[in-house]
Image: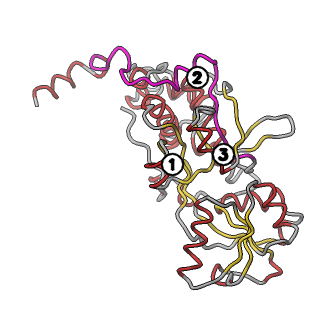
Amino acid sequence: MRKLILTAAIGLAAVLPAHRADAGPTLDAAKARGQLVCGVAADVQGFTRADSQGKWSGLGVDLCRATAAAIFGDAQKVEFVALDATKRFPALQAGEVDMLASNSTFTLARDAALGLDFAAIYYYDGQGFLVPRKLGKRTVKDLNGVSICLQPGTTTEANVVDFFQKNKMTFKVLPFDKVEDMRKAFFEGKCDALTADLSNLYATRVAYAPNPNDFLVLAQAISKEPLALVVRHGDNQFADIVRWSLFAMLEAEEYGITSMNVDQAAAMDHPLLKRMLGVTPGMGKALGVDEKWAYNIIKQVGNYGQSFDRNVGSNSPLKIPRGLNTLWTQGGLHYAPPIR
C-alpha cells in the first residue's frame, strides 16, 4: 500500500521508463522506411477501396492512417497493399506488411496458431447472404438447395457449412480465390447467393449490382464476425500503438472531440483531455511515440464516429446503421479502456 501511495504522489511521468524495454522490429522498420505498410482487403467499398487515382478510403484505411499519425505525426505516411483473403495472413507473417486492416475476423485458431495477434476489434459484424429478389428468398431458412459463391479457406466458408449442417439444409459451393471473380459470377447469375459479412454485402450491392434494388441482403446473421486489426505476435510495442490508436478515436467520440474542435478541447482544463491530447505528458512516453499522438490522430483522421459516418454510415452511400458499433454509452459494444 505504501508503494502505491508513493507512486500516486510522485506522478505518472516519474514512474514511466525512459524508453520501452519491449520495443520490437516493426516500429523500427517503419521508421527506417519512413512509412507504415498496411495490408488491406482488395476492394470493399466503405472499408478499403482505392479510386481511379489510387487514393485509398474507408474505415479500415482510416485506422491505418491513425496508426501512422501516432507514429509519424502524419496520417498520410502509409503504403496500402491490397491482399486477397488467402494471402493476407501469410503476407503479415512474412513481414511484407506491418499490420492488417483487412476485414479479418478475430477467432481463437487465428489468434493462437498463426503467430499473429488481433490487436483490437474495430467493427462488429455478422455473416449473411445477398440474393436476387426474383428468387423469392426472404430469410436464411429459405436457402435450402441453393448454390453459393464463396472464397474457400475462410471463416465465411466454415460458417456456411456449420449453418447448413445445423439446420439440415443442403447447398452447392462455387469456390473463387479472387473476390472480383466471385462477385462477377454472382451478378451474372452463376450462383443463387453470395455470402460475406453483412457490411460487405451492403457495399457490394451498392457498388457492383447492375440495379441494387434487384438484390436483397437477408437481415439475419448466421455468425459473429468481430473484425479486428492484426499484427505479428510478440511485437508488443507496435501492437500497443495500433490498439491505442483505435481506442483514442473511440475515446474522442465519447467525449465529443472531433477533428474540428480538438484544438479547443486541448485548451480545456480537463484532466482526461489534457492527458489524451498531450498537454499533460506521459501517455506518449508510455507508448514510445510523441506526446501529441492522439491529438494528431483526431486532428488528421477524426474520431471513430466521424470515420464511421463518412465511410459506411449516414454520410456514405452504404448508410449502414451503427447498431452494435455504437458506443457503450448508447447501448453499443464499443468501449475504450481509460487513457491514463
Left/right placement of residue 314 relative to residue 286 reads right
- Mark sitting earlier along the chain (1/2): 2
Circle 1 crowding by C-alpha within 10 Å: few under 14, some 14–19, many from 20: some
- Residue placed at 73% from the left, 50% from the top? 44
Residue under the image location 56 percent in, 52 percent down? 227
Residue under pointer 2: 30
Q: Earlier in the sequence, mark 2 or mark 3?
A: 2
Mark whose residue sits in front, 1 or 2: 2
Is residue 92 toward the left or the right of residue 201 in the image? Answer: left
Check disc 2 and report its element: helix, strand or loop.
Answer: helix
Badge 1 vs badge 3, beta-carbon distance below 8 Å: no
Local packing at callout 3 (Cα closer than 10 Å; few below 14, some 14-19, many 20+) is few
**Which scheme is used to colour this image of the protein?**
secondary structure
Q: Amino acid at mark 3?
A: Lys
Q: Earlier in the sequence, mark 1 or mark 3?
A: 3
User: Which residue does the numbered mark 3 point to in the structure image?
Assistant: 87
Read off the magenta span: 14-42
